Image: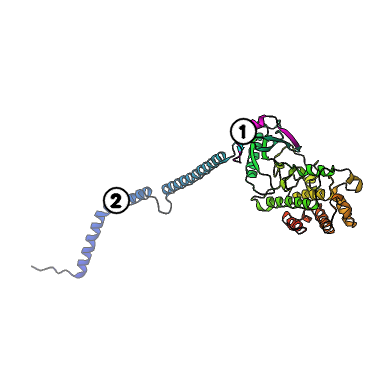
Amino acid sequence: MEKRRYSPQHTTTKVTAMLLLLSFCFHPILVQCQESRTKRTRHLSTEIPSPSRPPHFSSGLKRILLSIVLGVLTGLTGTILCAFAVRCLIRYMNRTPILKGPVIFSPKIAPKTLQSALASENQLLGSSSNGKYYRTVLDNGLTVVVKRLEPFESGSPERQSKSLKRRIQRELERLASLRHRNLMSLRAYVRESDRFSLVYDFVPTGSLEDAMNRVRDNQLQLSWEVRLRIAVGVVKGLRYLHFECVPHILHFNLKPTNVMLDAEFEPRLADCGLAKLMPNLDRATSGYSAPECLQNSRYTDKSDVFSFGMILGVLLTGRDPTDPFFGEATSGGSLGRWLQHLQQAGEAREALDKSILGEEGEEDEMLMAVRIAVICLSDLPADRPSSDELVLMLSQLHSF
């Protein structure tokens, strides 16, 4: 039997045929698998968001950020409201209470004794633009002066009246802490229904106004040395108020009726700082107010200096600033204009009080004092010296 021989070409052809047969048989299965894989890929792509655009993640992040911002704003608002409430509470607790009855600053005065003394008849000593002075004796024999301030405005609203009373109380407590030999010490005050009553030490000599009235009536002699001592004491009291008090204090109503004299004619300033608290006070008629106070209601330490210049002029001339003589002597009609006119004409000696003309040295001092008074009475506040400078200027005129 003859054997068949297979050539390599025949073998290759046979393998190719078998592969074609197998591919034909398995083609549907492969196509089905491919379709299943494609569907699964599409399904996964729809379920899992793309990292580049995560909608659910972005929405959640926005909500978190919005919650944080709202929480911060709510916290800040609550903190501000709480701080405001605490501040209002502290201000309410620290505000000055409206005290009733006497407030005593001196151990020599008992509240019951003072109240009984105020209820009794007292001797009227005088009056000023913002109240009247009474002399009274306490049960322990102490003699004091009581100044009854003018009543508050009846038409003021209740809230405004309470605010005014608190402001006056704060100012009185501040004034009670002042200590200087040329200031009247406030010993007590009493708040009544519509006014305040202030208690001071009794000064037997009275005020500078009283003393100068007695001089004009030839009932009292005041030498130049005493008058210069009074002037220096007054300006030392102003220097204490202007430069040594913190915060600084302005007198507001300096005039002879508010300059008290002790037994040695040492001056003490009264009513320091009270004038700005008085609603009905009218300083325009006093004759001692600075021009800027009358023109635009401005008041500075230089306004006090102007008032001091008027007092110095009264001490030098012995004349009252409201004397009609000045209207006839000068066109300006004031003590300051008259002194300025005489000084420019070289006739300052004619302004001096004849009762104090004595030795030649004293006359020179008085003429220098006239120049100082004229400077203090300058129309412009900037041209006036300070109270500190005035102490040096006046102290150099005489040895104290």
Q: Nearer the viewer, residue 242 or 67?
A: 242
Residue 248 lies in the magenta stretch: no
Is any atom of residue 172 visible in this view? yes
Residue 31 located left or right of residue 134: left
Q: Real-space Cα distance between discs 2 and 1?
A: 121 Å
Q: Quadrant of the N terminus?
A: bottom left
Q: Which residue is mark 1?
A: 113
Q: Position of residue 229 (x, y in %)?
A: 75, 52
The kind of residue on which mark 1 rests is: Thr
Question: Image quadrant for the C terminus?
Answer: bottom right
Is residue 110 rendered magenta in the image? Answer: yes
Q: Where in the figure is residue 89, as x and y percent of width and height?
A: 54, 39
Which residue range is magenta in the image? 104-126
Reading the chain from its start, which is encountered first: label 2 or label 1? 2
Place of residue 125 in the rendered image (x, y in percent of width and height, measured from the top left): 74, 36
Q: Name the amino acid type tagged 2.
A: Gln
At 82% from the left and 44% from the top, the residue drawn is: 215
Toward the viewer: 220 or 309? 220
| Figure quadrant of residue 285 | top right
In the image as oriented, which residue stretches furthest toward the right?
328
Count of picture labels? 2
What label sits on residue 32 in the rendered view?
2
Q: Quadrant of residue 369?
A: bottom right
Inspect this view and state whether residue 100 appears. Answer: no
Seen as rendered, the residue at the extreme left is 1
Q: Residues within 10 Å of mark 2 (few under 14, many from 20)?
A: few
